[in-house]
Each structure stands twice: as structure tokens, then as C-alpha cells.
Amino acid sequence: MKDVIRNIEAIIFASAEGIDLADIKQILQEALAIEVSKEELRELIKKIEDKYQDEDQVLELRYINNSYQFLTKAIYHEAIQQLQNHNNKRKLSQSALETLAIIAYRQPITKLEVEQIRGVSCDYSIQRLLEKKLIKIAGKADTIGKPLLYATSQQFMDHFGINGVRDLPQLKDIVTEDNAIGETNE
């Protein structure tokens, strides 16, 4: 029965949002090929709730809006708020996103080439992207002055949930045919 409890715990934890009793029951049936009544399931979930009541646990199992979910205990909310503030400061500006997109699609690429495409200086954006480890220095170009080449990093792949640049959306998938400049709609 301990294995079933651990599976329930894992299911609730892995849920992006709360998960209701019926869904937990169905997932258990499909994953473990076992039949558990709703009453048995409630008893097993009660054991999980009791486990997380311990003061050494930072999470608690809550029943909200007819579903179960793990939440951080209220005593840690100040630290979590600071984390949220910290992460908000780390968001990318529009110019950094544009620079990142150019690097992703044209890598390896020099800063000068990025600036030629964008039409503005990219020093700050490239520095921020390097700090966030979304891009990396991929070497030096074989041109005059040997400028640095930039490419996306493994953290870029992890952040956007892709395995490689081949998984990026193709430009033809983004740009529509009916967005041509100079044509009039009649």
C-alpha cells in the first residue's frame, strides 16, 4: 500500500494545477492496474496530508476547489514572495528577446551582424543574455578583428523546452502570406 501512497503523492505533486479524486483514481487504474474505491483513496490521501503536517515539511497537501494540490506552507510565503520578485527582475526586455531570436536563428553570429539586422546597438542585450546564460560565446570569426561568435546555450534549450535549434518554429510557420507590404485589400 505504501507504493500506492507514493504514486498518489507523485501524481498530485506532478499536477500543474489541482487534481480531483476522480482523475487520481483513473490515473492509478491506468498506471498501476489497480482498483481503488473513492473512500479508500480518501483514506490514502489523508495519510499523505498527515505526513505533510510535520513541521519539518515545507509543503502541505491542500484540498481547494474540489481538487488536491501541494502548496508551500504559509510560514514560507515571505521567502517565496522574494523569489517571485527576484524572478520578475530577471525577465527579458523586448530588445533582449529580439536579439535572442536573431542569435537563435542565425547562430553562430557576431554582434555586428546582430546589430546590422536590428539596426541598433546590442551591447546591453547581449551582455544580459550572457549573464542569464541563454547564449554563449561559440568561438571567434575568421574575419578582420576576430569578433566573437554567439550561439544559444544548453540553458536556452532547457528554458524553451527544445532539444536543439532544429526544434525552433520555422519562419514560414510564423509569417503568413497575407501580410505583404504594399498590397491593398479590396
Image: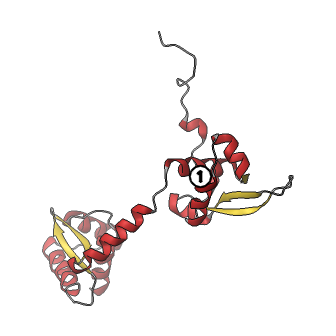
In this picture, is 133 found above or below 40?
above
Direction from residue 2 to residue 89 in the image, left or right: right
Give residue 138's position: percent from left, percent from top. 73, 62
Q: Quadrant of residue 157?
A: bottom right
Give residue 124's position: percent from left, percent from top. 59, 56
Inspect this view and state whether residue 11 appears: no
Direction from residue 78 to residue 129 in the image, left or right: right
Give residue 95's position: percent from left, percent from top. 54, 48
Report the number of discs: 1
Question: Which residue is labeled 1 in the image?
Answer: 100
Tell me which residue sits at (23%, 84%) in the image.
Answer: 52
Residue lying farthest to the top in this orientation: 186
Q: Quadrant of residue 75?
A: bottom left
- Label 1 sits on what residue type? Leu
Tell me which residue sits at (73%, 52%) in the image.
Answer: 110
Q: Secondary structure at mark 1?
A: helix
Residue lying farthest to the left in this orientation: 39
Give residue 44's position: percent from left, percent from top. 20, 80
Direction from residue 170 to residue 82 in the image, left or right: left
In this picture, is 42 found above or below 100?
below
Viewer-closest of 183 and 15: 183
Viewer-closest of 166 and 59: 59
